[in-house]
Amino acid sequence: MSRFETYHWQGVTLDDPGLEAARSELASPSDQDAALRAFVDLLRSGETAAMGIALDHYHYAISMERHGFGNVLRGYGHEALQCARQILRGAPSAASQTGASMNGAEYASALLIMINRAEEEDVESIARVLDAPPNYDAESAAFKSAGRILELSTGANERLVTALARVIFDDRRDAGDRLDALEALAKGSSPQALVEIKTAMELNDLGIQTTAAYALAVHDLAAYRSLIEEKAAAWPEDAPYPASDVRDILVECDDSAEEQ
């Protein structure tokens, strides 16, 4: 295992000496077996910060695996998911560890697991994070987790659609957050999701407008083509991505119609 500290728990010292020793071992492994034992001790500890540190390591291992590195933690995916669900069912806690306030770090760590493993039963937990005051680390992962559910689910998931729409249409929010929320919503194709995406295309922000147009073109071009064409005609030549893809879809549709 490669050396890795944590994403969200810098400066935290665990109160339990055994867990603190496990944290140190996992951050700088003496050997693979010892690191694996340390990971399991942290994951199964029942202590929020210790579990959060273990979840950070699990996500890091999965990420490194995509780059060709081995991953001895892969077999603990289901257990990591259950741990993440346990954390998300609770409220963000105050710090009891020495040296740092958690400030929702446990949610951020838990949601890293949800990015790749979230299921429909996790809708409410993720939506509650989106409803809460903005927290970049937690919310960024929540957007990705929400997008996964909307993409893979056959259900309407109105709770999740509503939570994402609230971010998209809040002009007090950072533009990047609003776009991230729309990109997550764009993975859904339920009637409610398409209505919210269509409404987003009426916003003045070009990034939001082009992203919404692309989503509608992919999900149901026949139903929304006239509206997409109207908006696309008003975009400048250097309109942000995915404006070029929207234009390509419209051209391809025209070419296909001429061939018939």
Image: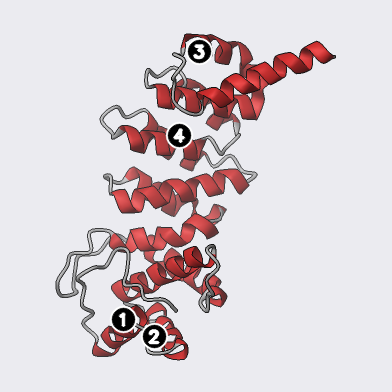
Vertical comparison of 145 with 186: above or below: below
Q: Which mark is residue 38?
A: 2
**Could you say which is closer to the camera, residue 128 or residue 136?**
136
Q: Is residue 250 visible?
A: yes
Which quarter of the rendering shows the N terminus? bottom left
Badge 1 density bin: few <14, some 14–19, many ≥20, Cα 10 Å: many
Q: Amino acid at mark 3?
A: Lys
Question: Residue 232's spot in the image, x, y percent?
Answer: 52, 14
Answer with left or right where residue 49 lies relative to residue 83: left
Q: Nearer the viewer, mark 4 or mark 1?
A: 1
Q: Are marks 3 and 4 in contact (CB under 8 Å)?
A: no
Q: Residue at x 37, y 45 (%)?
A: 130
Distance (Cα) linking label 2 and label 4 = 39 Å
Answer with left or right where residue 45 lies relative to residue 192: left
User: Which mark is first along the chain, 4 or 3?
Assistant: 4
Which quarter of the rendering shows the C terminus? top right
Badge 2 density bin: few <14, some 14–19, many ≥20, Cα 10 Å: many
Q: Amino acid at mark 4?
A: Leu
Q: Which residue in the structure is indicated by mark 1?
A: 23
Vertical comparison of 167 with 130: above or below: above
